[in-house]
Structure formats: C-alpha cells, structure tokens
Amino acid sequence: MNVAIYARVSTEMQAEDETPILGQVNECQSFAESRGWEVVATYKDEGFTGRNTDRPGFQQMLSDAQQKPSPFQKIIVWKGSRIARNVEDRLACQSILARRGIDIVSPNEPEFEGAIRALMIPLLAGIDEYESWRIGEDTLRGMKTLARQGYSPGGRPPR
C-alpha cells in the first residue's frame, strides 16, 4: 500500500529547530515500515498554524490526493491535530479524502471503525481545537503577567 506522511509545526522557533518535524516524520516512517507500507510522498508545513488550512504542504497534499489514480491510499500523521486544530476543517478534510478512498491514520491515536468512528473522529477534532484555544489563552495570560512585571514578553517592544 502506498502512503503519504504529513507533518506540521506551528511556530517558527519549532520550524528553525527542525527536530519536531524530523521526529514526526521519523515516527510516521517507522509506523509505515511496521505495516509494510511504502511512503511515496512526505508533505511538511513548518511554522504554520493548524487553525486554518492555508498551508502550502497541506494544499499540495490535497491536490495530489485528487489525482486519478490517487498516488496514496493513506496519510500518516503524528497526531490528528497535525491535519487541523479546527473541527470544521478537520472533518471537511477527512470527508474529501474519504471520498477518494484515502484514510488518515496515526501511530499515536487509535483507529476506529464502524459506528464508533462516527462518534470519535469529531470528538478528537473537538479536543484538538479546545487544546489550541487553551494554549493560546495560557500563553496570552503569561505574556500579560510578564509585561505587568516589567519584562518583555517577546515580540516588538511597546511604545
């Protein structure tokens, strides 16, 4: 079976480090090898949020998936949140791919079949979106605390 790998990191600091992306790809590669699957494409987005789908690697992957015949039957992601941290986008993407016979799988999340899949996929997508918003709120709270204490929270200095 031919498969693709999709990896994403959100921040430029992670993208500059390269380790998180490389770690995701390596784990997905090992997952494919353990099942006897052949990785025919690897797509990466470094420094792009998962809250929308405006990512060049992601868009290229979707475009390639539309080829006839499709070059791959599964997409391996480190976790489902790599596809999207937005419920609507994740479900839309999975639906588009499913119509082409392409499934998204992860070495770090269980594979669901049948009726339970209809419950669990939206639930996992909701958890990922919640986590994204929670991290954002926590980060903002920390930055405000630093600024109140007279420290620079990063970014451009205030005027």
Image (spheres, grey):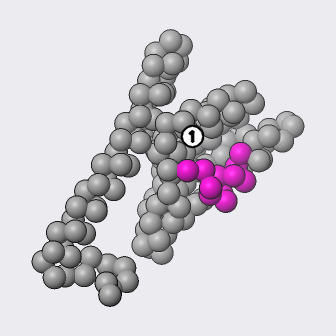
**Residue at disc 1, secondary structure:** helix
In the orientation shown, which residue stands out farthest toward the left? 149
- At x 30%, y 49%, the residue is 134
Q: Position of residue 108 (x, y in %)?
A: 42, 40
The percent coordinates of residue 50 (x first, y second) are 50, 52
**Vertical side of 138 occupied by 90: above or below:** above
What residue is disc 1 on? 89
Quadrant (top left/top right/bottom left/bottom right) for the C terminus: bottom left
The quarter of the picture where residue 124 lies is: top left
| Whether residue 43 can be seen here | no
Residue extending farthest front: 159
> Is 99 positioned to the left or the right of 143 in the image?
right
Q: Which residue is depicted at the point 40% across and 41% down? A: 128
For this orientation, the residue located farthest to the right is 68
Place residue 153 in its image quadrant. bottom left
Q: Report the residue at 46% width, 15% height from top.
A: 116
- Helix, strand or loop for the magenta stretch, by majority: helix
Q: In this view of the protein, which residue sits in the foreground, 62 or 20?
A: 62
The local crowd at label 1, few if under 14, some if 14 to 19, many if 20 or more residues have their Cα within 10 Å, is some
Provide residue 63's location: percent of width, then percent of height: 77, 47
Q: Horizontal placement of 122 versus 138: left or right?
A: right
Residue at 52%, 45% (x, y): give it: 84
Residue 71, visible in the rendered structure:
yes
Judge whether residue 126 is colored magenta. no
Q: Which residue range is magenta in the image?
A: 52-62
Tell me the quadrant of the picture where the N terminus can be found: top right
Asked if the stretch drawn in magenta spans residue 61, the answer is yes
Q: In the rendering, at what x and y percent does residue 54 appear?
A: 62, 55
Q: Is residue 105 left or right of residue 157?
A: right
Vertical placement of residue 28 versus 95, above or below:
below
